[in-house]
Amino acid sequence: MSKASVSLDVLRTFLAVYRSGSVTGAAHSLRMSQPAVSAQIKALETALDRRLFERLPRGVAPTAAADELARRLAAPLDMLAEAVGTDLDPDASARAVHLGGPAELMSTRVMGVLAPLVTGGLRIRVELGLADDLLDRLAAGTLDLVVSAVRPRRRGVHATPLLDEEFVLVAAPDWAARVGPAAGRVPGPARLAGVPVVAYAEDLPVIRRYWRTVFGTRPVMSAALVVPDLRGAVAAVVAGAGMSVLPRYLCEEELAAGRLVPLAEPELPPINTLFLAVRDGALTRRAVAAVHERLLRWGRDTLAAPSRDDGDG
């Protein structure tokens, strides 16, 4: 088989194996036998003179050559599949929209936003993780959309600002009482030196940014508790473990109920812009476009909502 004679079916099989990470999964979605899928992948590797997958105890891992091939094939094959329907995509689950994003935002906000699309018949598969890892998968073609906390800078990926998340420095009331009232809305960092720190990661990524923006200095403390899920950080701080910097959306109920107290209230609190990233060409699929539009509409509605300070005087 020469490069020129590689068939569309073989390329479709390759993309199914790449996206599922498994010959078995690809065979199921394509309604083929496992030996047939393996034979097509072997034929493609022979035609390209490159190894595309390494076998693992469970599934397969793509090589760098497979990553590059998937990046080039994903958008045009998806567009073709959408144009001709089930002839290229016989399994409905293969047409699911694959969406990635941070665990906290996806679990507490985005799932509710997308629920009406699911009840309307749309299939969605969600991956949770760190922005850089998810954006790599988006560029490679295994994800259709990513809600990203960093601006994507990858070839073949387009991003639109989605919404801004505000960060707030909080602790339980007992810790706030120990710190004592500050002369202004922003206490000096020395007043906070005795409060244990609850962080998302050892290098204090969110806290470091808050300290630089609000206090004009780098934090010199280390974390007393590290939990790689900000929902866990909220629970720990409410229970009295110390202080943390959290997105306001994640702790607004605790703030309203008095279970958490702001330790600083700067006039311009630090914010981070979230982006909705999509692979070039993916919006030609109606399902992907529907998810994309609903998320952007949610972002616009959130930004247009009255400020939490409106009417407070």
Image (spheres, grey):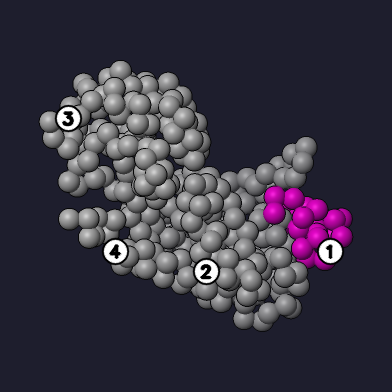
CA gap, disc 3 and disc 4: 29 Å
Circle 4 sits on which residue? 306
Circle 2 sits on which residue? 291
Element marked by disc 3: loop
Element marked by disc 1: loop
Q: Of the residues tagged 1 and 3, which is closer to the observer? A: 3
Residue at 58%, 46% (x, y): give it: 64
Residue at 63%, 45% (x, y): give it: 63
Circle 1 sits on which residue? 32
Q: Is residue 167 above or below residue 226?
A: below
Quadrant in which the C terminus appears: bottom left
* Image coords of residue 75 (percent x, y): 55, 67
* Image coords of residue 172 (percent x, y): 38, 31
Element marked by disc 2: helix
Query: Which numbered disc, 2 or 1, marks the residue that appears first in the sequence?
Result: 1
Amino acid type at image mark 1: Met
Query: Which numbered disc, 1 or 4, marks the residue that appears first in the sequence?
Result: 1
Name the magenta segment's main secondary structure: helix
Which picture quadrant has residue 38? bottom right
Q: Residue furthest left?
A: 183
Residue at 52%, 47% (x, y): give it: 103
Magenta part of the protein: which range? 20-46
Amino acid type at image mark 2: Val
CA gap, disc 2 and disc 1: 30 Å
Which picture quadrant has residue 12? bottom right
